Amino acid sequence: MLTLAGHTGTGRSVAYSPDGRLLASGAEDGTVRLWDPVRGEQLRLWANQSDSVEAVAFGVGGSLLFAGRADGELVALNPADPRPRWKHPAHPQGVRSILPHPDGQRVITAGWDREVCTWAVRRPERTRLVEPFDEPVSAAALAPDGRTLAVALNAGYKVFLIDPDAGRMHNRLMSDEGVVFSLAFSPDGSLLAAGDTAGRVALWARADLTRPHFLEGHAGAVYGLGFTPEGRRLVSTGQDRTARVWDVPTGRLVQPYQWHRSWATCLAVAPDGLTVATAGDDHVVALWDLPE
């Protein structure tokens, strides 16, 4: 396990570049940090972003890094340049999620203002994707083919599936308890994982959305989810300070880990599927190897 120290606030988001050579982290200290995940070295620091950087995501190809701030701005950064490429007001109450579209031309954002929007990568113009929701967005995920957007709301167990090209909702997933705070699609798009405040991870099969399969074991909210590239493993992390590795076909818990001294708030699986980055309330970014 490798520890990356530098943040002075809770980690809010981590993301690998598409080639896995860079790792970005955003935190409540108002900074975005760029790391070499092999050497554990900090390569660049973008400071004074706002009170908190809530989301980070690399664009397709890795030439741009997007950061979403608590003050509502969306910022486009060049990993090789200390100056922002552009920044633009996005969501007045804060950016919750940033989802680069696989076509490389668009980025989808979701915010606490109940809005989901799409942006042209080259020119920061906000376009509303669907009508505002009744509650703030608590999590969002985009299917690998870009054809389905999943959006969870911060009240009750509600997940909406949206066609981002048509701007049309075509399914709503609901369960008995909890609020969903993390979402992830499997690499082939056949499964949607949802982590909730009841400590469960629901696996919704796209072929049959009537009954999810639950993975249970976390003691508290599940804040981070990520599939390995081949889709066989799912990693979850959350309020109980643990990271858990699950075997997707069987639903079996492969291994629990406790790398953090406080809540683990987010995670990212490396593109090669060999390592995971987690960040937490202890201000630490941890890099660790997945079990074979």
Image: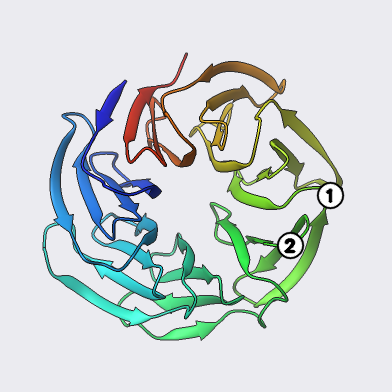
Q: Residues within 10 Å of mark 2 (few under 14, many from 20)?
A: some
Residue placed at 50% from the left, 85% from the top?
127
State whether residue 254 is above or below residue 152.
above
**Element under disc 1:** loop
Left or right of 226, for residue 193:
right
- Between disc 2 and disc 1, the foreground one is 2
Separation of residues labelled 2 and 1 (CA atoms) = 12 Å
Q: Residues within 10 Å of mark 1 (few under 14, many from 20)?
A: some
Residue placed at 13% from the left, 69% from the top?
83
User: The disc labelled 2 sits on which kind of residue?
Assistant: Ala
State whether residue 9 is above or below residue 134.
above
Left or right of 78, for residue 125:
right
Asked whether 132 or 79 is in front, the reply is 132
Tag 2 residue: 155
Residue placed at 68% from the left, 67% from the top?
162
Q: Residue 143 location, x and y as percent?
A: 58, 54
User: The disc labelled 1 sits on which kind of residue?
Assistant: Ser
Q: Residue 198 location, x and y as percent?
A: 73, 40
Asked whether 185 or 96 is in front, the reply is 96
Tag 1 residue: 175
Q: Residue 272 location, x and y as percent?
A: 37, 31
